[in-house]
Amino acid sequence: MRVSALCRLSRGAAAAPLAGRKGTAPRRGSASAWGRWEKQQAAGEIIQSSKKVLASLQKGHPTFKPTLAIVQASDEDLVQEINQNFAKEIGLHVIHICLPQGSSEDEIVGEILRLNEDPTVHGVALHLSENACSSKILNAVKPEKDVDGVSDVNLGRLVRGDTYNCSVSPTASAVMELLEKLVKTVDGKKVLLVEICGPLEASLQCLLQRKGAMTMSCQWKTQQLQSKLHQADVVVVGSTKPKEIPVSWIRPGTTIVDCYPDFLSGEHGYGQDVKYSNQSAIDAVGPLTIAMRMQNMVKTSERWIQSQQYREWNLHCLKLQPLSPVPSDIEISRGQSPKAVDVLAKEIGLLADEIEIYGQTKAKVRLSLLERLKDQTDGKYVLVAGITPTPLGEGKSTVTIGLVQALTAHLNVNSFACLRQPSQGPTFGVKGGAAGGGYAQVIPMEEFNLHLTGDIHAITAANNLLAAAIDARILHESTQSDKALYNRLVPVVNGVREFSSIQLARLKRLGINKTDPGTLTADEINTFVRLDIDPSTITWQRVLDTNDRFLRKITIGQANTEKGFFRQAQFDIAVASEIMAILALTTSLADMKERLGKMVVANDKNGQPVTAEDLGVTGALAVLMKDAIKPTLMQTLEGTPVFVHAGPFANIAHGNSSVLADKIALKLVGEEGFVVTEAGFGADIGMEKFFNIKCRASGLVPSVVVLVATVRALKMHGGGPNVTAGAPLKKEYTEENLQLVADGCCNLQKQIQIAQLFGVPVVVALNVFKTDSHAEVDLVCEIAKQSGAFDAVPCNHWSAGGRGAVELAQAVRKAASQENHFKYLYNLELPIIEKIRIIAQKVYGAEDIELSPAAQSQISRYSKQGFGNLPICMAKTHLSLSHQSERKGVPTGFILPISDVRASIGAGFIYPLVGTTQSSPSLGPYIQWRLLLLLAEKMSGSLLLQHSYQLAT
């Protein structure tokens, strides 16, 4: 048998033409053929059986529409209507794709790969000429969609006996079905395969030998053909018998099954000179093969539905062997060998086509998972927040990682950590990386802290493209006539002038209901081409992911080419861009594009908002962000899963990881699992914004708040000396001082009260340092419980990994089972000023607020423009509950000054600036030596490593 026979199943087995095919093939003899095939009992039984199975599947999944795509690149198209009729009878949808005869191998493979990635196509069959059926083409078909069983993967599964998870060649199955009816059993029979090769030969030999038959293979031109034919009890032929081979060579009574006759014409090369055991054997192989193909398609559909269901985790955690004293973070990270990310993905139930691998330890996860698991019940949702921190941070990321390591590696509970991507600004500044620390880290640490999968770079590119478009538009409008602008915005291409979809949308917003560029009046052209941006109202700034204080105020446009158009501008840190906030709050690609278009970048000279959509750049921004929207999968030191996605600051933005990462994780962990995410800085900032902004955007309801505290921070709030990054701690922080701790617990009590405003149970996690005494730890836990915390637990995950947070994990599980009374702090319908006042008084403890004239003017403008119903995102210092970072503990009696108010319309919030909040942090006198050390090691080995260490320290 020629290789192409396997692809075509029978000489005429092509698919029927349906919507979506690329060409139309001629029909021949379909009516009479259908009449004969209808009588074939075996084929009919298979069709009816397949119909029942599919009906049962669709009863449980009414929206499921199984689709078979048949790729044709030959001129043989004799029974396409039979494929169509069989499929229609069963309830299958068929797409018939006709490629030109003589299509190249790469063209055919390209079409197959496209169908592999099409989620609406569940099976792929090939109808190709014999010359086109190369191994490359056959193996291009994804094994899961290979209904003809032509791929090496399916053949391997068949050989291993894994028939449930593979598709068996329909032709081979049809031959076995016929032999069962003709000879009852092939056990002990000699079966000769003539002119059969390739995948069909392998399939037949495997199936026949498994039934006890002895198999031989040869070609029509084999010298010993006469002897082989005479010995055979069964002959299976794959092509028409040459006329020079006499029928007398075939022993009387031999059963012949012809896999490759032209069964429409009845020509098979044997004439009437040989008596067959059952003449129908020759005529039946064609329709039976097609029926087998349809049966394979139904089985493929059944496997597809099963693959889409939620999968139980089969997670193999990594072992930790904590050392004492605890080594540096980088030494710990380097000392653990992470699992390959595709292995991790499989362990937590992700499908192979749902991940995009970046190296060995990172992978993007596609949003299609949300559709696949849309009916899966969400797990429990845990937020990690903190008390007002010292400049050193109190370990919220470390607690987050320690908690999920404890839940999954030690309590065998599915859990996911969802973290923000760290900005390079703080990473190379005072704070350092954000991968956690000690034995509670995300690994590899350097991959996490540096670049990751490029999301922040994509945000930077998109942000600065929009900034460039703003200034370019102002320049062009100031130097060109209406006609010149119109010709550039709507150019004539190949003699035709057309509006783009974005331009049509702008015309509609302007009230110009025209679609022909040639019909606009002069006034309409003027209105269309001129945005009339007022440069003094531009709020969109350029960004970069570096702490560079000297770019906080700059002058742009000083080159002669800018024709005297210059203005003052500034650079912000990249993560302060509204595009970052949009990434964190969006729920889909379409939602992100809509939000990007809504971003207000300035006002025109009439005081009306100018958006990114008005500038016509929405599509370009969305393209730049198309990969950044997918969460990045990594792992902890103990091999538990982590999503890293989005990284807005909490003092100048809303300070939470992405809604999409949380939603995907909640589906993956299952109903009894936990998703643990972190809110930046203290609960007064990150947690308040999590509840009032993020939860409104996502619709998710948190189960528990874990409030992180340290004895160090509490002593600072109790009146201890200043804590300065880079300077040694004073003795008050390294020696027991119960009075300082007790006095500082006022801040902890206040943060517990803030959480209780939202009706969510609070578990206090005391992040224990080696300098903390038992008495200090016990005192904090006692005061926390007395202040309304559900529980308060000391944690040692930094030094012991997940084992050191088991008690915390148990407390969180208990708290999550409590009744939840979640509520928002304010109603969105309230005026902007009133919402600001509620946050200032109820959360920060201010006596009142004070608006500058600029802030008052902006609030009035935003209210008139229809933005008054947005939530509030306060931009203030994270080092105090007040606007003054030096005021620790729980300040009272202060007036909160609102210096300015801005709007992130695309992200969906108004953000007042409290005091003198900077949107671009500064760099200290040194760069984090650990990362310099790391970079040096990665670049040039130990010699440069030693030199870099000396230089950095």
Image (tube, rainbow, N blue to C red):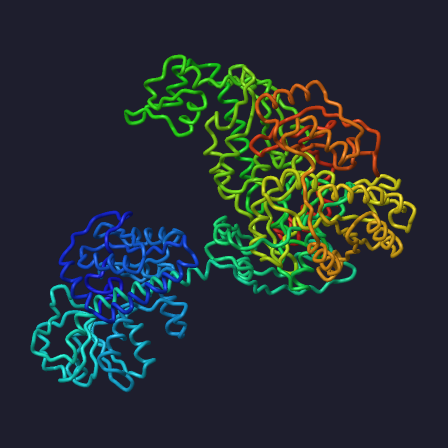
- Taking the image as shown, residue 371 lies to the left or right of residue 522, namely right
What x and y, as percent, mark residue 720? 88, 41
What x and y, as percent, mark residue 475? 50, 18
Quarter of the image containing the N terminus? bottom left
> Eyeballing the image, is 566 above or below 331?
above
The image shows a total of numbered marks equal to: 0
**Observer-nearest of 428 and 693:** 693
Query: Which picture quadrant has residue 518?
Result: top left
In percent of the image, x 67 and y 47: which residue is there? 678
> Eyeballing the image, is 212 above or below 87?
below
- Taking the image as shown, residue 47 lies to the left or right of residue 472, namely left
- Taking the image as shown, residue 336 lies to the left or right of residue 926, namely left
**Observer-nearest of 941 and 452:** 452
| Whether residue 828 is visible | yes
**Observer-nearest of 312 and 246:** 312
- Taking the image as shown, residue 791 lies to the left or right of residue 739, namely left
Query: Which picture quadrant has residue 48?
Result: bottom left
In percent of the image, x 77 and y 51: which residue is there? 764
What x and y, as percent, mark residue 547? 67, 35
What x and y, as percent, mark residue 660? 56, 46
> Eyeballing the image, is 471 above or below 235?
above
| Whether residue 150 is visible | no
